[in-house]
Amino acid sequence: MTHTEKTPAPISIVVRAADPVSLQGAEVLLRRSDGTVLLPADQVERADVILVLANEVTEETMSWMEEASTVSSNPEMRIVLVADRISKPRLAHAVRHGLVSVLPRAQTGFPEIVQAVLSSRAGSSQMPGELLRSLVEELRTLLRDPTGAIFPGGFEGREVEVLRLLAEGLDTTEIAAKLNYSERTIKNIIFAVTRRLNLRNRTHAVAYAMRVGAL
């Protein structure tokens, strides 16, 4: 009796890019690649992999990754980042949102990008040595001080900043200006908190944070 080997389902991908040329180029090449299927940007919740192309990782780039993590209905969703620069704090934050690979943009061709996307399903991770070392240092810091930047109730430092300003009566536009974030980022932070902690709305989030001692 012979056994027919089952062909794995193609990996569904959403591409986000800092410029339209990179976006269009990546989408054209992914459509031609075996084993991948390209989804429109408004179907990010269905994607297996979010491919993010940027020069420097900015607040907008972080907002893309946070949004993907927040809305995804796929527990195995992974993020592959192609960028020249990412700060250590943003790297650690992005990993919490599903980042598994960082490829240096100036030194990476499209075949390497496709391979990183395909291998991410099997749990593979690619990261330059200096970034990997910074993550190890972050972990060592958390082990020395288990509270790290995590506040009571499971809130993160940036979330507490936003909730504190909400408690003071500021709206999302005013909070964005005060913290030097985009308003979209502020809204994503609030949405992520309410979803993760099963809270009804921002007022409930502020009340909960006060009750558990985060504010």
Image: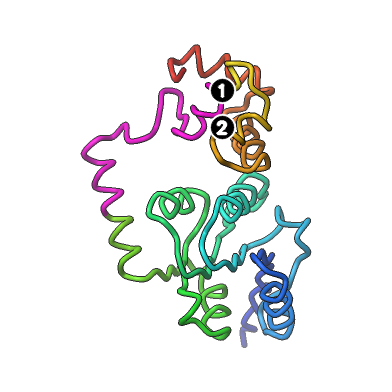
Magenta-highlighted residues: 137-164
Count neighbours of disc 2 (C-alpha within 10 A) and say few if under 14, some if 14 to 19, many if 20 or more. Answer: few
Quadrant of residue 192 within the rendered picture: top right
Residue at the spot 49% in from the left edge and 27% down from the top edge? 160
Q: Are marks 1 and 2 in contact (CB under 8 Å)?
A: yes
- Report the amino acid beneath label 2: Lys
Residue at 32% of width from left, 35% of height from top? 148
Q: Magenta region's main secondary structure?
A: helix
Up-down relation of residue 176 to residue 66 (above or below): above
**Residue 165: assigned label:** 1
Going from the N terminus, do you reach mark 1 or mark 2 first?
Answer: 1
The residue depicted at 58 percent of the width and 79 percent of the height is 114
Residue 144 image-quadrant placement? top left
* Percent of width and height locating residue 46: 71, 57
Q: Quadrant of the N terminus?
A: bottom right
Q: Nearer the viewer, mark 1 or mark 2?
A: 2
Q: Quadrant of residue 77?
A: bottom right
Q: Which residue is mark 2?
A: 178
Q: Residue at x 62, y 62 (%)?
A: 50
